[in-house]
Amino acid sequence: QVQLVESGGGLVQAGGSLRLSCAASDSISNLDTMGWYRQAPGKPRELVARITSGGVTNYADSVKGRFTISRDNAKNTVYLQMNSLKAEDTAVYYCNARLDRGSYSWAYYWGQGTRVTVSS
């Protein structure tokens, strides 16, 4: 069982920046993909960004050029640097990790979420 703890959320003005952190209870080098999702009120949870163990990243179109995901295997932590924040980025942000169990079997883990509020 992998536990994920997010931090770094808060209130920021439009145009500002925040950095979210996701600390894992186990070595993230064992986790083949880690990502950030978000859920705004009344909307479904959506992928924001993810990064593979090899460092390959992909982003939602809405955050490309503004957000950067990175991982530090030595610290068992994944980060989401968010710049040029907009009011529509307001949401609860969740960290997600996928563990490859082999034989086409995966386990998925979620953090408890951290709230980001962007004031316009």
Image: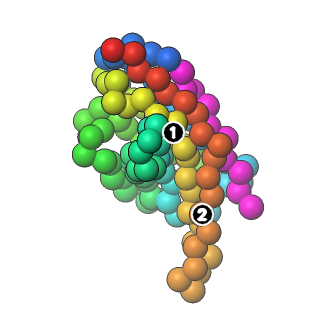
Picture quadrant of residue 21: top right
- Camera-side residue: 41 or 109? 41
User: Which numbered tag is attached to residue 57?
Assistant: none
In-image side of 62 versus 93 (left or right): left
x and y, in percent, of residue 25 in the image: 73, 49
The image shows residue 88, relative to residue 39, as above or below, that is above
In-image side of 92 versus 109 (left or right): left
User: Dot 1: few (<14), some (14–19), or many (≥20) neighbours within 10 Å?
Assistant: many
- Camera-side residue: 70 or 94? 94
Span of residues in magenta: 1-10
What kind of element bears circle 1? strand
User: Dot 2: few (<14), some (14–19), or many (≥20) neighbours within 10 Å?
Assistant: some
Residue 14 painted magenta: no
Amino acid type indicated by mark 1: Tyr
Seen as rendered, the residue at the extreme front is: 42
Residue 9 painted magenta: yes
The reply to whether discs 2 and 1 touch (Cβ–Cβ < 8 Å) is no
Q: Which residue is mark 2?
A: 108
Q: Which residue is mark 1?
A: 93
Residue at 31% across, 47% down: 60
Residue at 57% across, 27% down: 8
Amino acid type indicated by mark 2: Tyr
The image shows residue 12, relative to residue 67, as above or below, that is above
In-image side of 27 versus 62 (left or right): right
* Residue 27 is at least partly visible in this image: yes
Residue at 63% across, 58% down: 109
x and y, in percent, of residue 37 in the image: 46, 47
Compute the Cα span from label 2 to label 1. 16 Å
x and y, in percent, of residue 102 in the image: 59, 81
What kind of element bears circle 2? strand
Q: Earlier in the sequence, mark 2 or mark 1?
A: 1
Residue at 74% across, 61% down: 1
